[in-house]
Amino acid sequence: MPRKYIAPLIFRVMSETDRILRNFDDRIRELVSISILGGYRIRAIELEDATNTPIAHRIGRRVTLLASPPIGPSTSGRIEVVEDSQFDPDKYVVLKASGYGRTVTVDAWVF
C-alpha cells in the first residue's frame, strides 16, 4: 500500500504583543481608506438665495460636499450642489440655497 505524505504543519506562536500590533495595523489601514477623513471644513460660506455660488476647494479632483444646516435662525429651504459648466469641478463645487428668501451662512465638509 503506498504511503500518503502529509505536508508538515508550521505553527507560528504569536505573542500577545504581536497580536495587538497586528490588530492595530489592521484598524489603522481601515481608517486610512475612509475618504471622508481626507477632507476639510470650509467655514462661513455665504449663499445668496436662488444664486449659484462657486466654492473653491484644494483637493484637485471632483469632490463630495456635506453642508451644515444654515447657521442662525432660518425658515425652511434647501441647499443643493449644482452642476455648473462654467466652473471646473476639479477646482470648484457650486452650491445653491433656495427657499430661504435671504442670504444664509453654512459650513461645509469637502472630501
Image: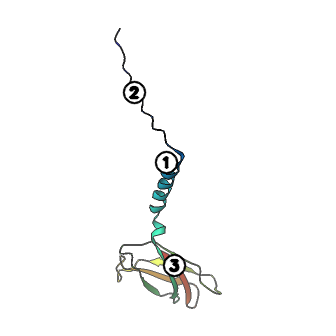
Residue sitting at x 49%, y 83%: 96
- Near mark 3 (Cα within 10 A), the count class, few <14, some 14-19 or many ≥20, is some
**Foreground tag (3 vs 1):** 1
* Image colouring: rainbow
| 25 vs 87: above or below | above
**Could you say where residue 60 lies in the image, as x and y percent from the top left?**
35, 75
Q: Position of residue 70 (x, y in %)?
A: 59, 83
Q: Is residue 72 above or below residue 3?
A: below
Q: At label 3, which amino acid type do we have?
A: Ala
Amino acid type at mark 1: Asp
Mark 1 and mark 2 in contact? Answer it, CB < 8 Å: no
Identify the residue position indicated by label 1 in the image: 18
Of tags 1 and 2, the one toward the viewer is 1
- Count of picture labels: 3
Provide residue 63's location: percent of width, then percent of height: 42, 72
Mark 3 touches mark 1? (CB < 8 Å): no
Residue on which disc 2 sits: 8
> Are the residues tagged 3 and 2 within 8 Å (C-beta)?
no
Which residue is at a point 58% across and 90% down the rendered structure image? 101
| SS label for mark 1 | helix
- Mark 1–mark 2 distance (CA, rounded to whole Å): 24 Å
**Circle nearer the viewer, 3 or 2:** 2
Q: Residues within 10 Å of mark 2 (few under 14, many from 20)?
A: few
Which of the two residues, 34 or 49, is positioned nearer the viewer here?
34
Residue under the point 57% across and 84% down: 99
* Residue position for label 3: 108
- For marks 3 and 2 on the same chain, the one whose residue lies earlier in the sequence: 2
- Sequence-first disc among 1 and 2: 2
Task: Give how far apart the Cα atoms at labels 3 and 1 are.
Answer: 41 Å
Q: Earlier in the sequence, mark 3 or mark 1?
A: 1
Identified by mark 2, the residue type is: Pro
Whether 5 is drawn above or below 58: the answer is above
